[in-house]
């Protein structure tokens, strides 16, 4: 299985990231409304921590779509690359 085919299968399994697009889009929309309606401090904190709310929502939607828990259709190189990128983001 080549890289392009692995990524295509992973996108099909996750429905092209619809859960993350929905969750993060909704939380950014809420942040945008907060910037218009409440104090700047409250809106800034909401924007800073919106990912804390969006990630569990996205994972819950993925679970409802049965994408979580099923075997990933990618080669081990993609998994290792994902871990490497994630660790570099944490360290950054």
Image (spheres, rainbow, N blue to C red):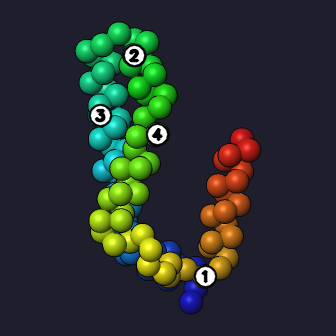
Q: Quadrant of the N terminus?
A: bottom right
Residue underneath mark 3: 29
Query: Is tag 4's residue or tag 2's residue first in the polypeptide sequence?
Result: 2
* Percent coordinates x, y for residue 91 in the rendering: 74, 44
* Percent coordinates x, y for residue 64 in the rendering: 29, 65
Q: Circles 4 and 1: CB distance less than 8 Å?
A: no
**Label at residue 42:** 2
Q: Give the CA separation, mark 3 to mark 2.
A: 15 Å
Up-down: is 17 above or below 9? above
* Percent coordinates x, y for residue 69 in the rendering: 44, 74
Residue underneath mark 1: 75
Residue underneath mark 4: 52
- SS under mark 4: helix
* Percent coordinates x, y for residue 18 in the rendering: 33, 59
Residue at 47%, 31% (x, y): give it. Answer: 49
Q: Circles 2 and 1: CB distance less than 8 Å?
A: no
């Amino acid at each position: 299985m080549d890289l392009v085919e692995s990524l295509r299968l992973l996108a099909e399994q996750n429905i092209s990231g619809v859960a993350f697009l929905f969750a993060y889009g909704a939380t950014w929309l809420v942040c945008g409304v907060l910037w218009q309606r409440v104090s700047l401090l409250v809106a800034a904190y909401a924007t800073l921590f919106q990912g804390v709310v969006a990630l569990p929502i996205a994972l819950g939607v993925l679970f409802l779509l049965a994408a979580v828990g099923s075997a990933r259709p990618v080669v081990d190189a993609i998994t290792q690359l994902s871990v490497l990128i994630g660790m570099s983001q944490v360290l950054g």
